[in-house]
Image: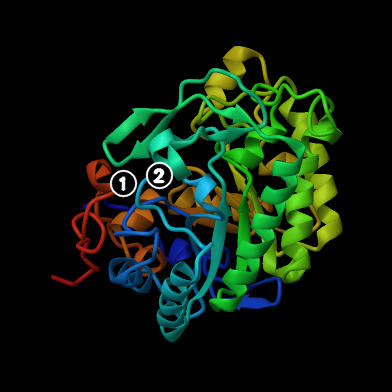
């Protein structure tokens, strides 16, 4: 086990383990389960019993979970056996999961996404081409029935298809609400469709959805408006990766772009803004001469709660909250390996190590078999 013995001061730290409100919700601590693609559905992208047990394991009274990236349509799939929420069967599967999480006292948002160009024809209806804002060669991979494969070069979305996709996010929001979720998070990060529209390394359009920062932000803002119209602002959140290079992304001026986006998001009264910190890519960006953009920058603009994510441990999480740059911190790898992570962090207990080989796809191994802490 990884040892992180805490001092008395850290154990009683008022940051990580103080209550906070997020939209209309009251949360008992700031240790959030990050939305993590695990590819554990069996067929039809329907949540199953494995997934129910996984989320219940990580539920705590007053805790806050963000469920994994979930397809808003069959065209939005980038990972085989990842979940969707565009059919009745999927909605029913999520409803069973949400009820089980609520029974443990946790609150849970669903992250909605569309993979865009990060897909493969084998994942698309009728083996069609993936969709994206522009046709730009890239070096991405998709999780296919045959394992990890190079993505299929996408075709460009027509304007009427963009409008249809915006509606798909609204319909998915309505289904998430009907399934009992406490809110929804738009995945606008990590090189998926919304991010592809935002950044000019992937968006080469010359119409109203390309060119200027305002035009490239249009798709995200229309999607958020549609989601809010199907629920309310304080039940909707957005995740951004302003300094992200994952999935072959780039932008010529990320600070200007994401400052504008953040300012525009204020008008919706969102539950929170979820920011992926440049903790693991900062040196690369500095080498390229582009300033990393982090929550420290966006905190000056955004008027609501901020969740930070990106390779944090307990001390780093406590520090960013104490500095006031974020209100909560989302954990990925450590929460995968430690279903009782809030308890371990609160009491300064050692952590289970994580196994990367079992992160994506498979069965209960590396998914449900990580042990809870037990005293010797």
Q: Residue at left 78%, top 45%? A: 262
Horizontally, residue 292 falls left or right of residue 49, namely: right
Q: For mark 1, what is the residue?
A: 360
Of residues 311 and 33, the one drawn nearer to the viewer in this rendering: 33
Assign a secondary structure to mark 2: loop
Q: Residue at left 69%, top 61%? A: 170
Q: Is residue 314 visible?
A: yes
| Tally of numbered discs | 2
Q: For mark 2, what is the residue?
A: 79
The answer to whether 78 is drawn above or below residue 343 in the figure is above
Label 2 or label 1, whichever lies nearer to me, is: 2
Distance between the alpha carbons at the discs numbered 2 and 1: 9 Å
The answer to whether 38 is drawn above or below residue 176 in the figure is above
Q: Position of residue 331 (x, y in %)?
A: 45, 54
The answer to whether 46 is drawn above or below residue 252 in the figure is below
Of residues 370 and 153, the one drawn nearer to the viewer in this rendering: 153
- State if disc 1 and disc 2 touch (CB < 8 Å): yes
Colouring:
rainbow
Q: Dividing the image into 4 quarters, which one contains the C terminus?
A: bottom left
Q: Residue at left 31%, top 57%? A: 40
The residue at the far bottom in this view is: 103
The answer to whether 98 is drawn above or below residue 130 in the figure is below
Of residues 2 and 152, the one drawn nearer to the viewer in this rendering: 152
Q: Position of residue 222 (x, y in %)?
A: 78, 50
């Amino acid at each position: 086990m990884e040892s992180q013995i805490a001092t008395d001061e850290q154990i009683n730290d008022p940051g990580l383990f103080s209550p906070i409100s997020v939209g209309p919700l009251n949360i008992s601590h700031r240790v959030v389960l990050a939305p993590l693609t695990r590819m554990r559905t069996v067929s039809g992208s329907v949540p199953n019993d494995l997934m129910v047990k996984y989320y219940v394991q990580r539920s705590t009274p007053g805790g806050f979970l963000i469920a994994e990236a979930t397809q808003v349509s069959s065209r939005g799939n980038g990972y085989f056996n990842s979940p969707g929420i565009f059919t009745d069967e999927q909605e029913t599967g999520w409803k069973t999961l949400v009820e089980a999480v609520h029974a443990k006292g946790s609150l849970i948002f669903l992250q909605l996404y569309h993979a865009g160009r990060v897909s493969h024809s084998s994942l698309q209806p009728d083996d069609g081409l993936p969709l994206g804002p522009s046709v730009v060669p890239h070096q991405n991979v998709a999780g296919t029935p045959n394992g990890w494969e190079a993505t299929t070069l996408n075709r460009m979305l027509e304007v009427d298809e963009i409008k249809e996709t915006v509606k798909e996010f609204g319909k998915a929001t309505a289904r998430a609400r009907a399934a009992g979720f406490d809110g929804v998070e738009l995945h606008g990060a990590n090189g998926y469709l919304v991010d592809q529209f935002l950044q000019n390394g992937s968006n080469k359009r010359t119409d109203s959805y390309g060119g200027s920062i305002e035009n490239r932000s249009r798709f995200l803002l229309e999607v958020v408006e549609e989601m809010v119209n199907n629920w309310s602002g304080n039940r909707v959140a957005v995740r951004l990766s302003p300094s992200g290079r994952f999935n072959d992304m780039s932008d010529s001026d990320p600070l200007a772009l994401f400052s504008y986006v953040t300012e525009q998001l204020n008008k919706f009264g969102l539950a929170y803004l979820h920011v992926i910190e440049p903790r693991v890519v900062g040196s690369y960006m500095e080498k390229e001469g582009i300033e990393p953009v982090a929550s420290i920058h966006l905190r000056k603009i955004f008027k609501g709660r901020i969740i930070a994510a990106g390779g944090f441990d307990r001390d780093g999480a406590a520090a960013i909250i104490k500095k006031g740059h974020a209100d909560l911190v989302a954990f990925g790898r450590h929460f995968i390996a430690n279903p009782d992570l809030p308890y371990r962090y609160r009491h300064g207990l050692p952590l289970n190590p994580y196994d990367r080989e079992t992160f994506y796809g498979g069965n209960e191994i590396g998914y449900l078999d990580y042990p809870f802490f037990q005293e010797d």
